[in-house]
Image (cartoon, rainbow, N blue to C red):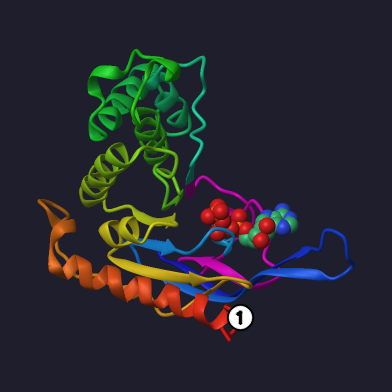
Amino acid sequence: MRLRIQGVGKEFAGRDTHRSFAALDDVNLDVREGELLTLVGPSGCGKSTLLDLIAGLAAPTTGRILLDGVPLDGPGLDRGIVLQQYALFPWRTALSNIEFALEGRAATKRERAELARGYLDLVGLGEFGDRYPHELSLGMPQRVAIARSLAADPAVLLLDEPFAALDAGTRESLQVELARVWEKTGTTVLFATRSVDEAVYLGRRVAVMTSRPGRIGRPVEVDLGPREGDLRGGSRFGEYRHEVWRLLRSDVDQKAPVAS
Ligand SMILES: Nc1ncnc2c1ncn2[C@@H]1O[C@H](COP(=O)(O)OP(=O)(O)OP(=O)(O)O)[C@@H](O)[C@H]1O
């Protein structure tokens, strides 16, 4: 499904003043059907605010958001969201967490268990279905959280810095895993991150968000083919990384005080 963000602004009430503060201003972005688009920007630029608006958890102050041409009106099962702090039910096993997302989709318990097993296999955790969240390690809970969101069969999957809390090695292997899952499912994905590397590795297009207020320029097309092998060490990866870094940097330069 195609997601269109049109002239979106979001203002919050200032903490100590009567003046409002613009977290987002005139944000325009199209996420194409079946594409994995990454949104990269510094801390506080408004990535989570934008994802919350798309999830329908808050309403934009100006502009509108459309899913296949239909304006959004609140939250819906057509949008799944995975956050940095995964939110699995601690009293349910990995399999049962996924089954929960299938309650609206599969009529019988048996059907749900079968489908849930398929999603666990998809994220490479077929053998861990009986484990409880506290028994899972090294990024496994995030993989279950992704499987659970996919199980609800959302039109758009929103990922808000899902790997930010992980160590570097685990983070890289989850990126590889997500790239593989996305290639297999073709789900429309919007992935927010602060990491330029992560944005370039995962994104078929990378949208750079600048801050105060958050704005998005024209996304960079990343033509690196399937994400396999030592892609990150290659010169083309380095070129894309530099281009995205330069776009982020130009925002910092504009805002930095002039050096004397
Ligand atoms: N409910 C709120 N009320 C007031 N200000 C808010 C609210 N939510 C976010 N903000 C402010 O809006 C700006 C954007 O915040 P947001 O969390 O969207 O940024 P972010 O890019 O996701 O940051 P990070 O990468 O650190 O998660 C920040 O200045 C933040 O303090």
- Residue at left offset 29%, top offset 28%: 120
- Residue at left offset 40%, top offset 28%: 141
Q: Residue 17, image x and y in percent? A: 88, 65
Quarter of the rendered structure image containing ligand 1: bottom right
Q: Residue 94, image x and y in percent? A: 38, 21
**What residue did someone put label 1 on?**
257
SS category of the residue bearing label 1? loop
Q: Which corner quadrant holds the N terminus? A: bottom left
Above or below — where is 106 with respect to 207?
Answer: above
Above or below — where is 89 with respect to 184?
Answer: above
**59 within the magenta span:** yes
Left or right of 157, for residue 115 = left
Residue 199: which quarter of the image? bottom left
Foreground residue among 245 and 157: 245
Left or right of 85, for residue 238 = left
Residue 137: which quarter of the image? top left
Left or right of 132, for residue 66 = right
Q: Which corner quadrant holds the C terminus? A: bottom right
- Residue at left offset 36%, top offset 71%: 245
Q: Which residues are magenta?
A: 52-80
- Residue at left offset 59%, top offset 60%: 44
For residue 137, say whether it is visible.
yes
Q: Residue 200, image x and y in percent? A: 29, 62
Foreground residue among 183 and 233: 233
Ligand 1 closer than 8 Å to the CB at disc 1? no
Q: Residue 154, image x and y in percent? A: 42, 47
User: What amino acid does circle 1 point to?
Assistant: Pro
Foreground residue among 216 and 115: 216
**73 within the magenta span:** yes
Above or below — where is 245 with respect to 180?
Answer: below
